[in-house]
Image (cartoon, grey):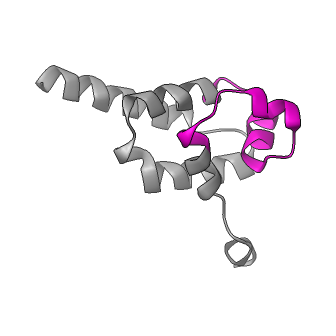
Amino acid sequence: MLNAEILRDAEQRRLAWRCRRGMLELDIVLQRFVNEHFSGLTLAEMEQLDALLELPDNVFWDLIQGVNPQAEMAPSGVILEKLRASRPTAEQETA
């Protein structure tokens, strides 16, 4: 069991590092996501996140925003809903 915990911790650190992006808006959402949801991710959700992190920033951002119909064809699932929930509200954006 210890090896599984070590591997999970290493995978979480790797994914957290990959969540650092060049697009400010995407970076904000991903950092909030890491702070709010990351420790509770299942292995399947980590795999979904890893696939999403392969996308270019603009495509990934469109997917989170739901503005590009073709982006909806990208890997998604529960992880995408958690990412969308990590978007700042209008109040938070003006503060």
Image side of residue 25 versus residue 30, left or right? right
Quadrant of res 32:
bottom right
Residue nearer the viewer, 93 or 70: 70
In percent of width and height, residue 41 lies at 40, 40
Numbered disc total: 0
| Residue 93, above or below 41 | below
Quadrant of res 8:
top left
Image side of residue 59 versus residue 85, left or right? right
Residue 4 counted in the magenta span: no
Magenta-colored segment: predominant secondary structure: helix
Residue 56 visible to the viewer: no
In percent of width and height, residue 39 lies at 35, 46
Quadrant containing the C terminus is: bottom right
The magenta stretch spans which residues?
A: 53-80
Q: Residue at 65% x, 52% y: name it.
A: 84
| Residue 36, above or below 10 | below
Q: Residue at 37% x, 35% y: name it.
A: 42
Residue 4 visible to the viewer: yes
Residue nearer the viewer, 39 or 94: 39
Residue 75 counted in the magenta span: yes
Q: Residue at 87% x, 39% y: name it.
A: 68
Residue nearer the viewer, 68 or 12: 68
In percent of width and height, residue 30 lies at 59, 47
